[in-house]
Image (spheres, rainbow, N blue to C red):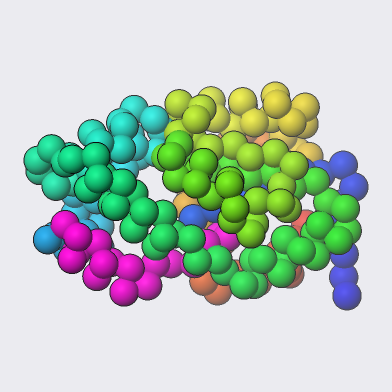
Amino acid sequence: MSTLSRPGTWYLFDYGMVISAAPLQADWDALREATGLDLQNASSPYWATRLEFDGGALSPAAYWAGVLGRDAEADEVARLEELDARQWSRVNPRTMQVLQDLADEGAQLALLSNMPAEMSFRYEAGAPWVTYFRKLYFSGRLGMVKPDSRIYKHVLADLGAAPEDVVFIDDNAANIDAAQALGIQAVRHTEDTDLRQELSLSAER
């Protein structure tokens, strides 16, 4: 089996649609039942202020009030937060295997995710992927989001790594472009990506 990692390199993973799989239809149906709204469409209020929520500019109560178009009681917010965290909690088994293989090689692993703070705390307390990472960076705690260059510069400084010594894996083209503009190596992750092959090729360069 080919080597996936290169000594001295940090492998910086996104979470959503890289480590996590896409929500199931049943997940969106559960949110529709709870809210009375179809939130799956890209034009829905679920997405309208999601980046602000991810960046910590909105509290859960404020975010869900925007989604619902009205204020929500604390117990309703808690229920919606639970459903939201659940729908993004399913992991991609192929990525999990790559993480295991990288860990077996002793690779340096870090995570950089646009994620609301409360969701990140929930996952950090018990999600199966957390233990692979030496460093975890969440936008909701940092107050900045990808693709803002500041968040990449923060991560590089905290890792003590040169851009060329970081391989960034993300599903969003804008995030990839922003990382590459700083000299970070990057792999765009899609449903068709053979991540093992991409990392093997990177390790050979």
Q: Nearer the viewer, residue 49 or 136?
A: 136
Task: Answer with left or right where residue 143 lies relative to residue 160.
Answer: left
- Give, as a single range, the part of the protein colored magenta: 18-35
Look at the image and tell me whether residue 66 can be seen: no
The quarter of the displayed image where residue 201 is located: bottom right
Horizontal arrangement in the rendering, residue 96 relative to residue 42 (left or right): right
Q: Is residue 21 above or below residue 169?
A: below
The image position of residue 6, as x and y in percent, is 86, 52
Task: Please indicate whether residue 69 sits to the left or right of residue 148 in the image.
Answer: left
In the picture, which quadrant includes the N terminus?
bottom right
Q: Is residue 77 above or below residue 42?
A: above
Q: Quadrant of residue 4?
A: bottom right
Q: Quadrant of residue 18?
A: bottom right
- Residue 67 location in percent, x, y? 18, 46
Instruction: Say if 126 sits above or below 150 in the image.
Output: below
Which of 120 and 92 lies nearest the eye of the viewer?
A: 120
Residue at 80%, 46% (x, y): give it: 108
Write the residue at 13% across / 37% down.
71
In magenta stretch: residue 107: no
Identify which residue is drawn at 50% across, 30% down.
141
- Residue shown at the point (41%, 33%) measured from the top left: 55
| Residue 109 horizontal/vertical position (percent) | 74, 47
